[in-house]
Image: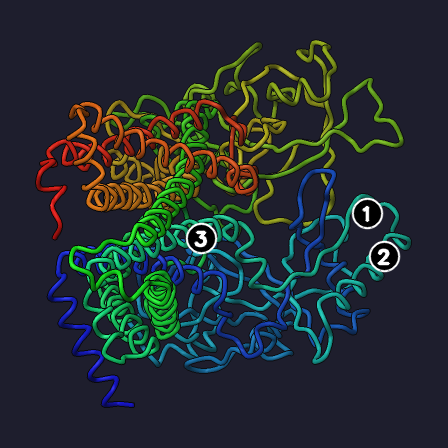
């Protein structure tokens, strides 16, 4: 068997050298198809398929609350609810809670703002994570007075403390308080929550039953299923517990539900549709590549028909010949696969760079995608599958061929020529139809993306610099100090060279952060069967609307007189007015905020008396650009001081170039105050549309490859048909046909194949485009402009691909064509 294999391989190599042009085209075509599939599979494997690196990670779940009335399916839980779930659930071995916020590191090095996490003491035990140095938390460290311990990530340990192993057991200052470092996490620790953000500090959470609130949701809840317990069983149990708690506490969670989901499914819930769409697109590209190579090999088999007929006449069986053709096909496939690995590596590098621009929260674990053994195994499987797939047509053609006809002097088989042309024509129709599907999808996403970019975000993002500050409670413990810092900072920054205006807010548009509140309208009682009006809130300083370029429809902005001594005021967004005032003029009317009891670190000190509405602001895009507009209540920071400040600065020139001056101005007010998240509003806009940009770019690339392959395939088919019909064309010209008639005949044949492909592709698109419905903005899946442009483009490509063979046909010499070989 090895000797036979070696002989077949040597013969296959000689045939590749003999038909080197066909071989090079086939290898290049397969390299594109296989490389694109290997690259996208590597991303799919890293993001969707590869489990988290925890023991039995399939047992680890999130437990979310849901609020379908507000379209929210990933709501966090209150401390009291978490304790109830811990006590009553039997489906989980353990439940653990998790809460993140900013922390300020001080001490020997410069002040630094990092993300810290307070979590249940059993968090790392639930995950099965061991410390690289030291230990994780002990159960007793969840008790008040024993919770001043911290576990550091490997990155922070290296960056700030130089990887000093003696740090374990020593104290560091976090928010002005001493915490003992008890452990260092492994370098490759991958936290569960589906984001690329770095969480550097891990501290135990203390939850006392008598102090746990039920009115403030602040905890993300994890659970590890018991052995043998299914996700459906856990879901049923939690629904029962949740229903029981609703009966016991009817004032809470009236319209809420509960949802148990595995951590991997939750982490990729936003990226899954896009990645599956891309995998389908590259699969179609590979299908076109295989069809092209099959067509090339069939044409090569036609050129070798006399050689194969002689071998069979001398006693060679059908199987050895088919085996030889299969060996040649597999050799081509593996050569294409080797070249495809190089293309895949280049593609992965580009994917990681483009994906990084799509934002931290868009594609988790994308940066870990690489050509590992799983990806190489997938590539090997593709090589074998494609090699077998495109060898079928030549093998079937040889087995069905009449032995005597090729051995005749000048013999031709009309039936064989007709069968070959039918196969080639079918390949072209398939390629054009697949190209139409890919181009239509790309066109719809592109038009949607352009519509999205054409939609105003509600503010002017140009020349706006932003940076974030968190005022630690140990230093800014009362409202007066917080207010004084905000006033002085805004004055210092506003006086800096190149600054037009400066202001602050707690939550920036499109940042992924927002606060929610309910409110009551004075004189308009909420019906018993309806919930109170709700809106996002933003606490802003005077000049915010001018700095951000948010228009005021009516009324006025906040001023310096809107402070603690002045009357309470508020500004509503246009959507809030349309949603809750029913055509009534809101200016001068009063609202009262309804804030649940309980502590949230980002929450301002709200003013709870009646607030007079003094203005109506234009709508601003929140969360994701393109999502439905939501109502917003704006509150003055001088009446609602907040420890979280996002500074917004409008500059005359390049925004980022002004950052050092702005930071220096802040340091003049408080030299120990760290500043972080230095970005422009254009950066936030880019992140908001990053995933859609990612989709359009990649799908457009694959559609372009598909169209190029289809053009090559159509050119090859028309060239093959012209060579097969040279005798017929010679007869036509001998009987008086003009070159223009021959040109028209060949062009018509190519365009008719393209038209059949457009018809087949249009039928296929009816079902396929439904997958894009949720990805489109302002465009319908049956958009006639898109389909018309795609059809014109494909017909133009078909005309160009057919033109060269058509012109070659006009040069056929009738005398030469009519001679026997």
Q: Which mark is residue 363?
A: 3
Q: Position of residue 710 (x, y in %)?
A: 31, 43
Q: How is the image coloured?
A: rainbow
Disc 1 element: loop
Q: Position of residue 429 (x, y in %)?
A: 39, 42
The earlier-in-sequence mark between 2 and 3 is 2
Disc 3 element: loop
Residue in the foreground of this view, choosing between 30 and 262: 30
Q: Position of residue 738 (x, y in %)?
A: 16, 23
- The residue carrying pointer 1 sits among few (fewer than 14), some (14 to 19) or many (20 or more) residues within 10 Å by Cα, namely few
Q: Is residue 611 above or below residue 378?
A: above
Q: Is residue 542 above or below residue 708?
A: above
The earlier-in-sequence mark between 2 and 1 is 2
Rounded to the nearest angstrom, the CA distance separating label 2 from label 3 is 36 Å
Q: Which mark is residue 252?
A: 1
**Quarter of the rendering occupied by the N terminus:** bottom left
């Amino acid at each position: 068997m090895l000797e036979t294999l070696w002989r077949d391989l040597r013969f296959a190599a000689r045939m590749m050298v003999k038909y080197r042009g066909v071989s090079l085209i086939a290898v290049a075509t397969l390299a594109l198809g296989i490389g694109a599939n290997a690259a996208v599979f590597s991303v799919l494997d890293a993001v969707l398929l590869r489990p988290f690196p925890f023991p039995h990670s399939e047992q680890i779940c999130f437990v979310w609350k849901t609020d379908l009335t507000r379209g929210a399916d990933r709501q966090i839980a209150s401390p009291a609810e978490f304790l109830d779930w811990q006590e009553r659930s039997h489906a989980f071995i353990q439940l653990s809670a998790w809460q993140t916020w900013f922390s300020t590191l001080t001490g020997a090095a410069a002040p630094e703002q990092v993300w810290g996490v307070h979590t249940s003491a059993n968090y790392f035990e639930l995950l099965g994570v061991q410390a690289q140095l030291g230990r994780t938390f002990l159960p007793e460290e969840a008790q008040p007075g024993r919770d001043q311990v911290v576990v550091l990530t490997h990155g922070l340990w290296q960056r700030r403390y130089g990887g000093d192993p003696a740090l374990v057991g020593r104290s560091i200052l976090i928010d002005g308080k001493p915490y003992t470092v008890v452990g260092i996490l492994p370098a490759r620790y991958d936290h569960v929550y589906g984001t690329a953000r770095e969480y550097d500090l891990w501290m135990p959470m203390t939850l006392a039953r008598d102090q746990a609130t039920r009115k403030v949701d602040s905890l993300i809840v994890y659970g590890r299923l018991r052995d043998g317990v299914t996700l459906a069983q856990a879901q049923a149990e939690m629904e029962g517990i949740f229903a029981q708690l609703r009966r016991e506490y009817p004032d809470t969670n009236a319209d809420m539900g509960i949802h148990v989901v595995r951590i991997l499914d939750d982490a990729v819930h936003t990226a899954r549709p896009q990645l599956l769409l891309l995998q389908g697109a590259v699969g179609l590209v590979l299908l076109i590549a295989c069809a092209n190579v099959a067509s090339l090999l069939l044409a090569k088999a036609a050129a070798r028909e006399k050689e194969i007929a002689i071998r069979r006449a001398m006693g060679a069986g059908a199987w050895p010949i088919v085996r030889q053709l299969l060996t040649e096909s597999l050799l081509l496939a593996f050569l294409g696969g080797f070249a495809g690995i190089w293309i895949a590596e280049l593609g992965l590098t580009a994917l990681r760079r483009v994906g990084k621009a799509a934002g931290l929260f868009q594609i988790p674990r994308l940066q870990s995608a690489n050509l590992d053994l799983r990806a190489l195994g997938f590539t090997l499987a593709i090589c074998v599958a494609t090699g077998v797939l495109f060898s079928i047509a030549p093998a079937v053609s040889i087995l069905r061929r009449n032995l005597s006809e090729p051995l005749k002097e000048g013999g031709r088989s009309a039936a064989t020529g007709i069968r070959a042309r039918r196969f080639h024509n079918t390949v072209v129709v398939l390629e054009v139809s697949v190209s139409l599907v890919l181009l239509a999808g790309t066109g719809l996403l592109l038009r949607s993306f352009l519509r999205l970019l054409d939609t105003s975000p509600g503010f002017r993002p140009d020349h706006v610099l932003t940076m974030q500050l968190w005022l630690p409670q140990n230093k800014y413990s009362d409202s007066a100090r917080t207010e004084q810092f905000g006033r002085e900072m805004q004055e210092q920054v506003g006086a800096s060279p190149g600054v037009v205006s400066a202001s602050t807010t707690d939550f920036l548009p499109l940042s992924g952060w927002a606060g929610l509140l309910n409110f009551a309208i004075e004189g308009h009682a909420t019906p018993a069967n309806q919930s109170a009006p709700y809106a996002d809130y933003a606490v802003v300083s005077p000049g915010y609307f001018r700095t951000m370029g948010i228009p005021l429809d009516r009324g006025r902005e906040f001023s310096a007189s809107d402070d603690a001594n002045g009357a309470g005021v508020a500004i509503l967004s246009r959507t809030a007015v349309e949603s809750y005032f029913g055509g009534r003029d809101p200016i001068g009317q009063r609202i009262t905020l309804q804030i649940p009891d309980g502590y949230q670190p980002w929450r301002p000190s709200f003013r709870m008396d009646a607030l007079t509405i003094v203005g109506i602001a234009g709508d601003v895009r929140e969360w994701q650009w393109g999502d439905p507009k939501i109502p917003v209540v704006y509150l003055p920071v001088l009446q609602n001081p907040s420890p979280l400040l996002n500074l917004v600065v409008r500059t005359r020139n390049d925004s980022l170039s002004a950052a050092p001056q702005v930071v220096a101005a802040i340091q003049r007010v408080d030299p120990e105050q760290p500043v972080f998240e230095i970005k422009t509003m254009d950066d936030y806009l880019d992140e908001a549309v990053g995933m859609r940009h990612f989709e359009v770019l990649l799908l457009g690339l694959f559609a372009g490859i598909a169209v190029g392959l289809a053009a090559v395939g159509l050119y090859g088919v028309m060239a093959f048909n012209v060579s097969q019909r040279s005798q017929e064309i010679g007869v036509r010209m001998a009987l008086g046909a003009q070159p223009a008639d021959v040109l028209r005949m060949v062009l018509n044949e190519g365009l008719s194949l393209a038209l059949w492909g457009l018809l087949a592709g249009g039928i296929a698109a009816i079902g396929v485009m439904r997958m894009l419905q949720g990805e489109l903005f302002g465009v319908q899946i049956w958009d006639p402009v898109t389909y018309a442009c795609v059809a014109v483009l494909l017909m133009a490509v078909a005309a160009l691909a057919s033109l060269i063979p058509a012109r070659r046909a006009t040069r056929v010499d009738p005398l030469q064509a009519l001679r026997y070989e």
